[in-house]
């Protein structure tokens, strides 16, 4: 059962309202929407599969993470912790898991099976509590927890600190000589509350479109 919708969950309607609000007050975001249109309303499934995708996305493109997730689904049909734990190292390597990511997802699957991590309950928590609960699992750091909050739980103010594509988008839009540091990026993002997740979508849209994706 997916986590219940949190009062703060983004809908396409809310997202459109947020885009209008953000573009009215942030010239660089207005530039993106003017040039490329509104970003797609990207979402991922909540629960185990969504977290597996968030882990697979660490330091690789979303396309290659999604390709590995699709291979995993073909192999075990339903992406559940129990079925994942039936796969050996060789199978996971074939699917596209590095040894480290295989370890992380096994740890996550075991935490769910043992009842140490209840993703239904996590889905109903406030953002900071979600982050804390997820980061208690080895291999889930702030960026992974935040992308799960953003795409799977659709929280409107989740901000994936440490995302290189967001930093490069800001570099482009502000005509900066170098990529801004992550602390600088986080400071810029403060001005986009309570819609930082929507601002991130706009910036990713710019990053992907300018690179022909």
Image: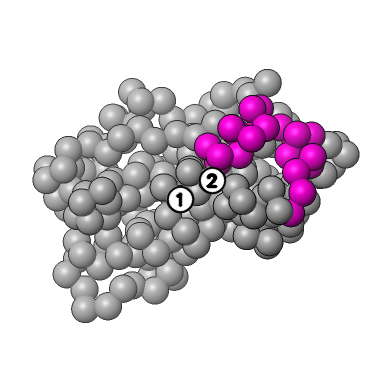
The span shown in magenta is 69-89
Cβ–Cβ under 8 Å for marks 1 and 2: yes
* Residue under the point 83% across and 36% down: 113
Residue 121 spot, x, y in % from top left: 73, 31
In the image, taking residue 201 as reference, residue 128 lies left or right, namely right
Q: Which residue is mark 2?
A: 68
Residue 187: quarter of image: bottom left
Please give the name of the residue rendered at 26% of the width and 43% of the height, measured from the top-left corner: 22
Q: Position of residue 152 (x, y in %)?
A: 53, 36
- Farthest residue in the right direction? 114
The image's mark for residue 64 is 1
Please tell me in which quadrant of the rendered image residue 51 appears: top right
Secondary element under disc 1, as helix, strand or loop, is: helix
Residue at left offset 20%, top offset 51%: 212
Q: Is residue 85 magenta?
A: yes
- Residue 155 in sight in this render: no
């Amino acid at each position: 059962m997916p986590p219940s919708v949190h009062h703060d969950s983004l809908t396409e309607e809310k997202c459109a309202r947020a885009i209008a609000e953000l573009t009215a007050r942030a010239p660089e975001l207005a530039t993106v929407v003017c040039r490329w249109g509104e970003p797609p309303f990207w979402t991922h499934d909540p629960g185990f599969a969504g977290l597996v995708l968030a882990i697979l996305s660490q330091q690789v493109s979303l396309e290659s993470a999604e390709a590995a997730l699709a291979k995993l689904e073909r192999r075990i049909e339903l992406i559940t912790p129990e079925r994942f734990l039936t796969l050996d190292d060789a199978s996971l390597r074939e699917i596209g898991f590095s040894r480290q990511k295989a370890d992380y997802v096994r740890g996550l699957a075991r935490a769910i099976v043992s009842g140490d991590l209840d993703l239904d309950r996590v889905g109903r928590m406030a953002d900071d509590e979600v982050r804390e609960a997820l980061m208690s699992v080895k291999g889930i750091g702030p960026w992974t927890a935040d992308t799960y909050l953003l795409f799977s739980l659709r929280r409107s103010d989740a901000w994936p600190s440490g995302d290189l594509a967001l930093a490069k988008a800001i570099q482009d839009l502000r005509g900066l000589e170098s990529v801004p540091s992550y602390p600088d990026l986080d400071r810029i993002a403060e001005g986009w509350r309570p819609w930082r997740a929507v601002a991130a979508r706009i910036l990713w849209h710019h990053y992907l479109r300018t690179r022909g994706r």
